[in-house]
Amino acid sequence: TLEPQMAANLDGGTGGELNAAALMAGLRTYFRSGTTADLAWRRQQLSQLRRMLSDNEEQFLQALREDLNKAPQEGYTTEVSALYGDIDHALKYLKKWAGKRRVSTPVIAQPGRSYIQPEPLGVVLIIGAWNYPLQLLLSPLVPAIAAGNCAVVKPSELAPATSKLVTELLPRYLDNDAFACVEGAVPETTALLEQRWDHILYTGGGAVGKIVMNAAARHLTPVTLELGGKSPCIVADDANIDVAARRIAWGKFTNAGQTCVAPDYLLCTKATADRLLPAIEKAVREMFGDDPGRSADYGRIVNRRHAQRLADYLADGDVVFGGRVEIENRYVAPTVLRNVGVQAPVMQEEIFGPMLPVIELEDFGQVEAFVNGREKPLALYVFTRNEHLADRILSHCSSGNACVNDCMMFMTAHDLPFGGVGPSGMGAYHGEHGFKTFSHFKAVMKRSYLFDLDLRYAPFTGKKFKL
Ligand code: NAD
């Protein structure tokens, strides 16, 4: 019976006991029924997901406003419309992605045909983060559906309005036998992680990433970990300062800096910093006015604990501009810090907030050593007019993703894989890369009964081999 799964789904929303085993049993039974293998069904589910968003757009934007004070335009572009893009892209290419791919067959296996056949993994778990609570939860669900899986999504408890809304709406639009949304925090996630999933995609910090990977290892479940890190923003002396400043300010202060691919710190010479920092201040003023605290377009920190954590960084350097913090209002002004020690907490931890420390190098040639002396970041940014310089830095410094002369824009390209490397994550998704993440590529060879040469069969005496 599929009833327990529905009950578990509803319980997740009301804080009752989550019966993760019953939920899993129901989903697995349904997966085995073969319904999800049908491309028409997958298409219908993707369209329904799109409909859930479009029917309830206002409510989603309102929830994002409540959780993070996201301006509706920002919520729309970075979350809702990004998801429309994901869904439309998947609908357009689903047939191609899911099709068999013919490959060559060696002479020894002729007559025969070889091909790669994608198949769904089964029942997958997607654990979302709070900073883009809608997009980071549903963007992995799109390829999970496209690849023909059943899935459970677990929204972040730190963005409660979005979590509640998705949990309420998802069952109204998607096939309840195949998908469930489970609200909850550590106990619920722990209960889910005890189950045997066919894949887990987790977005969040590395500490919990280790918990997820440990739990997955017990069942040999493969994982995709979308983690974070300190993404450097390198600005060369020849950069277009005004454009760079605007793009850096946008990358750093969108969503009040709570973006996994936000530039974490600036790396440049003192001469460049002297020109760049006033330009960033100007860009901030143009975006959010003289007092960002009164701007309808400037976000809030997710909770007071994180606001306090960010406030503590103010002790780590000299405030160039900003520096105002109101813990009660979860407000942290766009802030730039100078004269920051590399051992200070602000340079040791991922900032994940609107504070931009500047590391001034005596010689620009030190940038690669500086970046390579630290953990591999999720993103790396280089601003320069010199393409050779950009290429050299990109080939010498490892990072999950990179962008030259802009921040974060690689996220918009469906054909680019999005994922980290080393401590910033493993695996990737977006577009076809997401489809691959949630698929197994089965190697198939079809042979004919013709020409059954006895060369390979024992006894081998008297047979001539050329090894
Ligand atoms: P988090 O690690 O606190 O939470 C992520 C999820 O894990 C939540 O759903 C939460 O309920 C669950 N969780 C928390 N504690 C758990 C536990 N003990 N056991 C099981 N599950 C648990 O998220 P965070 O660290 O606050 O998120 C910020 C981090 O996420 C940053 O490092 C950021 O860079 C990273 N991030 C990465 C991406 C990406 O796409 N690569 C996107 C957003 C955020």
Image (cartoon, rainbow, N blue to C red):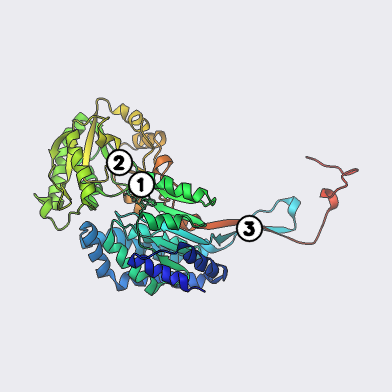
Q: Amino acid at mark 1?
A: Gly
- CA distance separating discs 3 and 1: 39 Å
Report if the beta carbon of the residue with label 3 is closer than 8 angstroms to ligand 1: no
Give the Cα separation between the discs numbered 3 and 2.
44 Å
- Total numbered badges shown on the rendered structure: 3
Q: Earlier in the sequence, mark 3 or mark 2?
A: 3
Q: Which residue is mark 2?
A: 350
Contact between labelled residues 2 and 1, with CB atoms less than 8 Å apart: yes
User: Where does the C terminus fall, quadrant-wise?
Assistant: top right
Residue at x-position 29% and y-position 71%? 56
Name the residue beneath numbered marker 3.
115
Residue 43, visible in the rendered structure? no
Residue 205 is labelled as: 1
The residues bearing labels 1 and 2 have C-alpha atoms spaced at a distance of 10 Å
Q: Name the residue type under label 3.
A: Tyr
Please tell me whether residue 279 is drawn above or below residue 342 in the rendered image. Answer: below
Residue 174 against residue 105 in the figure, above or below = below
The residue sitting at the left extreme is 290
Position of residue 142 measured from the top left corner of the image (x, y, whole percent): 42, 63
Q: Earlier in the sequence, mark 3 or mark 1?
A: 3
Furthest-front residue in this view: 17
> Where residue 36 appears, x then y in whole percent?
52, 69
Ligand 1 within 8 Å of the CB at mark 1: yes
Q: Looking at the rendered structure, which numbered label has been put on residue 453?
A: none
